Amino acid sequence: MIERIVDFFGDERHAIRRRRLFYLVLVLIVVADFLVSREHAEYLWERLPGWSAVYGFGSCVLLIFVSKFLGHQGGLMRREDYYD
């Protein structure tokens, strides 16, 4: 069982089926977000369908860019053979 799952996610033969599955899950999540009750939202943007997904995606992208900037420009990253 676990071997079939690993093969599905790791093998290039299943790339098209895997991509279709991910797109289907994404569409189901977006559709489900329109069905959620928003009666108790405090702020205007919390009432927008998909706000949490957009906010989470933007936060992840910002976190990646900030960490890359600190690693490369901030001097936190070292050469591969730094300790040799």
Image (cartoon, rainbow, N blue to C red):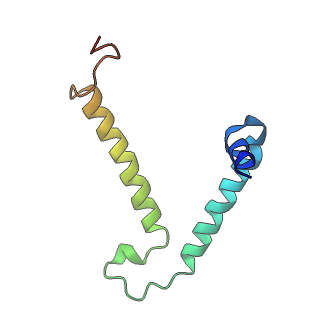
**Residue 55 percent across, percent down from the top left:** 39, 60
Q: Position of residue 76 (x, y in %)?
A: 23, 28
Kindly identify the residue that appears in the image at 74 percent across and 52 percent down: 1
Q: Nearer the viewer, residue 39 or 8?
A: 8
Residue that protrudes farthest toward the bottom in the picture: 39
Q: Is residue 48 above or below residue 37?
A: above
Q: Judge whether 23 appears above or below 74 on screen.
A: below
Q: Quadrant of residue 56?
A: bottom left
List x then y, in percent, for residue 51: 43, 67
Residue for point 37% across, 73% down: 45
Question: For the C terminus, which image quadrant?
Answer: top left
- Taking the image as shown, residue 15 lies to the left or right of residue 64, namely right
Position of 17 with respect to 53 (left or right) is: right
Residue 72 appears in which quarter of the rendering? Answer: top left
Relative depth, front residue between 45 and 5: 5
Above or below, 59 against 32 in this view is above
Looking at the image, residue 28 sits to the left or right of residue 50; the answer is right
Residue 32 image offset from top left, x and y in percent: 59, 74
* Residue found at the far top of this picture: 84
State the residue at coordinates (72%, 45%): 3
Count the marks: how many? Answer: 0
Dividing the picture into quarters, in which one does residue 65 lie? top left
Q: Residue furthest left?
A: 74
Front residue of 26 and 80: 80
75 relative to 13 in the view: left or right: left
